[in-house]
Image: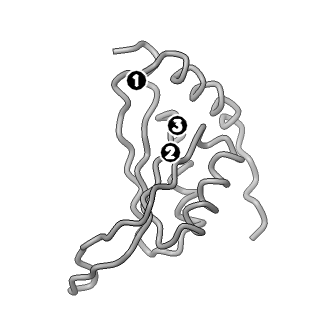
């Protein structure tokens, strides 16, 4: 394990559309809550909601960030997201390419100072 990796995580999210995912990703990077956000291609999600089985098109989103920023990142996603119960799940990074891990830490360091939300 790399000494840098315990402080970093990958945050998996879903969005209802590519446009929504890009808007969330831009906000997270601009506000230094994530170093990078990947918006992946369309997928189909099957889930139970309010007693019914649903099958809907969604977009997967991956963000690289620091573990200590996850609560703020999650709150920001909730504020921007169209879903009542948005998927935001943090997974630890066990290791990786040291220069990349350093870059993630450096890009999110400014996230230590709260950034006011962008106007809607």
95 in relation to 28, above or below? above
Name the residue located 58 percent from the left edge and 41 percent from the top edge. Answer: 36
Q: Secondary structure at mark 3?
A: strand
- Residue 108 in which image quadrant: top right
Q: Secondary structure at mark 1?
A: helix
User: Which of the two residues, 69 or 82, is positioned nearer the viewer here?
Assistant: 82
The C terminus - image quarter: bottom right
Marks 2,1: beta carbons within 8 A: no
| Residue at numbered disc 2 | 63
Outermost residue on the right side: it is 119
55 in relation to 81, above or below? below
Q: Position of residue 39 (x, y in %)?
A: 51, 55
Query: Disc 3 to disc 2, how far (Cα)?
Result: 6 Å
Name the residue located 46 percent from the left edge and 35 percent from the top edge. Answer: 67
Name the residue located 54 percent from the left edge and 39 percent from the top edge. Answer: 69
| Residue at numbered disc 1 | 6
Query: Disc 2 to disc 1, how far (Cα)?
Result: 16 Å
Colouring: one colour
The N terminus - image quarter: top left
Please tell me the numbered disc located at residue 65: 3
- Residue 2 in which image quadrant: top left
In the image, 22: left or right of 84? right
Which of the two discs, 1 and 3, labels the residue nearer the N terminus? 1
């Amino acid at each position: 394990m790399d000494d840098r990796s315990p402080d970093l995580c990958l945050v998996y999210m879903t969005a209802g559309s590519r446009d929504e995912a890009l808007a969330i990703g831009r906000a997270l990077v601009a506000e230094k809550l994530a170093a990078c956000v990947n918006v992946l291609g369309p997928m189909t999600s099957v889930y139970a909601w309010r007693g019914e089985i649903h099958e809907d098109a969604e977009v997967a989103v991956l963000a690289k960030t620091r573990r200590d920023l996850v609560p703020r990142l999650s709150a920001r996603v909730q504020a921007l997201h169209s879903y009542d119960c948005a998927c935001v799940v943090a997974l630890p990074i066990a290791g990786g390419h040291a220069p990349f891990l350093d870059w993630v830490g450096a890009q999110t360091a400014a996230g230590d100072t709260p950034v006011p939300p962008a106007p809607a």
